[in-house]
Amino acid sequence: MNKLAHLPIAIFASVMGMSGLTLGWLKAGNMGWPVASGIGLVAAIITSALLAFLLLMYALKASRYWPAVCDEARHPIKLNFFAAIPIGLILVSTLWSGIEPTFAAPIWWAGISAMLVATLFTMNSWIHHSHYQVGHLNPAWFIPVVGNILVPIAGMRFGQIEISWFFFSIGVVFWIVLTTLVMNRLIFHDALIDRMRPTLFILLAPPAVGFVSYLSLNGMALDAFARILYFTALFLALLLGINAVKFLKLPFFISGWAYSFPIAAMTVASFEMGQLTSLFGYIALAWGLLALLTVVVVYLVYKTLMALFAGKLLAPEPAH
């Protein structure tokens, strides 16, 4: 079988990571550092090209190896990564919404349409299933939820108030439901296998993204709910931070891209807090996170390319 048949759907998490890095640098540029805006623009171009390339490659896979795509869609873990495709569209539209809105708007509409389909398909699979077990549950199940929470960031710029609230509501309500399920799985059942441990960082994404989205919906007002979202994200960042050594000891997996977008979401959220409160601590934290994020993404790009050249990226996944 051609190597293209083994192109993993999880590779679209790299678009989320690159988009997060871009948003971080663009936000830094808005804070008054022109060089950061230039870096953000270059990163936006690279991220858009990456999404277009991966969409083409996965479309070729679907046209030639449709059974392989169906196998991923039926897989209890890989299924959730299909939502990374519409998330990529939504994120790329968000990148360009402040640069070239005319270009960004149709991408946003395509992204939210696909996001709704992906969410309905995924949740329908969860409900009407015959093969899911507790061991299949992991933080990657948050991915469709995070996608919905992202919608208002660009949606409010396009004046789509009701649609933005619709998707935000889905994301927030089911984030709470999934948090309960995932914490039950983590506490009372077997530990995650090494390949899935990086997905623990996804726990950070919903409250951090939710904070940024809620600010957009709420006219950038820092009210009680906004603070709850931010400080929930901050606590989770600390919880993950004290386990940094454990994550550093893990070998590289494509799931390692799960580190990037949550860190990016926390970075942007901290820039927003710094801007709204004018407190140096938040701004310093944001810059520190942006530096960390940049290092993490550069490392992930390097390791992904090495895996590609070594023939490991487009190879059958080893049995657990």
Image (cartoon, rainbow, N blue to C red):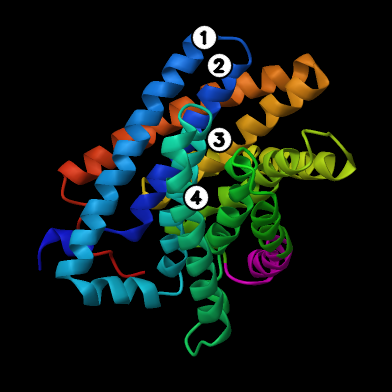
Label number found at residue 29: 2
How far apart marks 2 and 3 lie (CA) works out to: 15 Å
Residue topped by disc 1: 34
- Which one is closest to the eye, mark 2 or mark 3? 2
Q: What secondary structure is found at the residue carrying circle 2?
A: helix
Q: Quadrant of the C terminus?
A: bottom left
**Amino acid found under the numbered disc labelled 2:** Gly
**Amino acid found under the numbered disc labelled 3:** Ala
Image marks 1 and 4: residues in contact by CB distance under 8 Å: no
How far apart marks 1 and 3 lie (CA) works out to: 19 Å
Q: Answer yes or no: is residue 271 visible.
A: yes
Q: Nearer the viewer, residue 178 or 30?
A: 30
- Which one is closest to the eye, mark 3 or mark 4? 3
| Lower sequence index among marks 1 and 2 | 2
Left or right: where 130 falls relative to 70:
right
Relative to 168, residue 181 above or below: below
Tell me the crowding category of disc 4: few under 14, some 14 to 19, or many 20 or more residues within 10 angstroms, Cα based: many
Q: What residue is at 63 percent from the left and 37 percent from the top?
A: 241
| Lower sequence index among marks 2 and 3 | 2
Residue 198: image location, x then y, percent: 50, 50
How far apart marks 1 and 4 lie (CA) works out to: 33 Å
Q: What secondary structure is found at the residue carrying circle 4?
A: helix
Label number found at residue 120: none
Q: Which residues are magenta?
A: 174-190
| Lower sequence index among marks 1 and 4 | 1
Q: Quadrant of residue 187?
A: bottom right
Image marks 2 and 4: residues in contact by CB distance under 8 Å: no
Q: What residue is at 43 percent from the left and 69 percent from the top?
A: 79
